Amino acid sequence: MKEAFPEHGGNLSWASERYGLAREDFIDFSSNVNPLGPPAVALQAAKDALEMISRYPEPDCYSLKQSLAHHLCVPESTLVLGNGSSELIHHVVRCLRPSGVTVVAPAFGEYERAAGAAGIDCFTFPLSASDDFTLDGGGLADLGSRTDMLFFCNPSSPSGILYKREALAPALEALRERGGTLVIDESFMGFCPPDKAARASMVPEVSRGNLLVISTLTKIFALAGVRGPGFLVGSDDIARELERKAVPWRVNSVASAAGEAALRDDEYIRRTREMVPVWREEVKNGLEESGFFEAYPSEANFLLLRLLDERADGFELTEELGRKGILVRNCFNFSGLDPGFIRVAVLSAEKNAALVNAVMDVLG
């Protein structure tokens, strides 16, 4: 049953129980973290931090905030940190209490769940897969004039498509006129080439207000187990309000130490941006050459795939691959995607080849 599937990928305990394999026997394409694994310096910093496990962490994670401010070239006063980006998504909705939330879909499910948890109506602005998820700037601007909070993920999850900053500018201006807030989730921006990221990231716009950029160290540094940490960039006034209403000690000392160390590892970031596009193109070509899929253009560390055979079902394919120890993300709970879609993370060349071979075995 589809209802038995977890809301998010990467749940190895669930997979082990469902498919009867040990957790370590799975190749996990359902979780979109860096295929290089955590930086060695981050692992060492995390181990060292355990020596101080009896001590409280910094209440507002000030040391990590300083490192992030330097990395992002923003003032420390504009940053709010959290236990992953998901906590910050919920925190923003609870604290700002918009009268309504609109989500550009298909999208990460926590935007809608955050609205529901706060008792706030949530609406969707659908992008069409048949139109390659093209963004209608005029339609989005019109929407911005009618909603109090708009969520948009860039690069988009699950499609991986990267949108330029000017495509979102009309909606942001409409929200500013209304007094609303544009919330941009840039959790996968770190995988984009620096020149493209510079043309797409909304961080340079936050000082003008009515805009929040949420991201995380979870994806780019493969720190999912310590929840990133996540971070938010906003204008001074809104960051101050969100910080004042946040709980203390929300980022533990191990996560903070790992994050600080990872941010200093420039060589790791360089290698990530070198290898992920190569592996992404290899697995994209392999899956498309199989004749079973169309892959959407992605700038992130994952691919959205559409099964070309209309009779095929992504749910059934997910089940068959799971039995073989290959975990992929079916897309049945992404608004606007039919059962013919799956999403796969980009892993190493060897693991990507295993995915292609397993798909050929199941579908061929």
Image: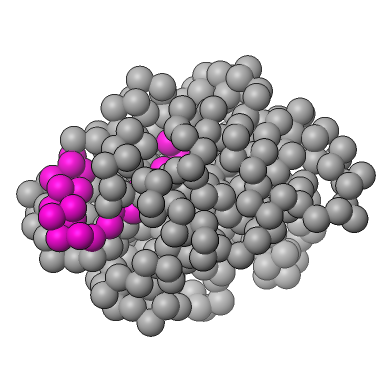
Q: Pick the residue in front: 17 or 208.
A: 208
In the image, is 10 to the left or to the right of 309? Answer: right
Residue drawn at (50%, 78%) of the image: 3
Image height check: is 193 above or below 94?
A: above
In the image, is 323 to the left or to the right of 285? Answer: right
Image height check: is 287 above or below 310?
A: above
Is 175 in the magenta? yes
Q: Pick the residue in front: 194 or 255.
A: 255
Image height check: is 34 above or below 316?
A: above
Residue drawn at (40%, 46%) of the image: 236
Q: Say whether residue 36 is visible.
A: no
Q: Position of residue 353 (x, y in %)?
A: 58, 34
Residue drawn at (47%, 66%) of the image: 90
Q: Can you tell which quarter of the image residue 207 is in? A: top left
Is 85 in the magenta? no
Q: Pick the residue in front: 359 or 19.
A: 19
For the image shown, how many numbered marks are present on the structure? 0
Residue stretch rendered in magenta on the structure: 167-190
Q: Position of residue 347 (x, y in %)?
A: 59, 36
Q: Position of residue 178 (x, y in %)?
A: 15, 60
In the image, is 174 to the left or to the right of 333? Answer: left
Residue drawn at (70%, 44%) of the image: 256
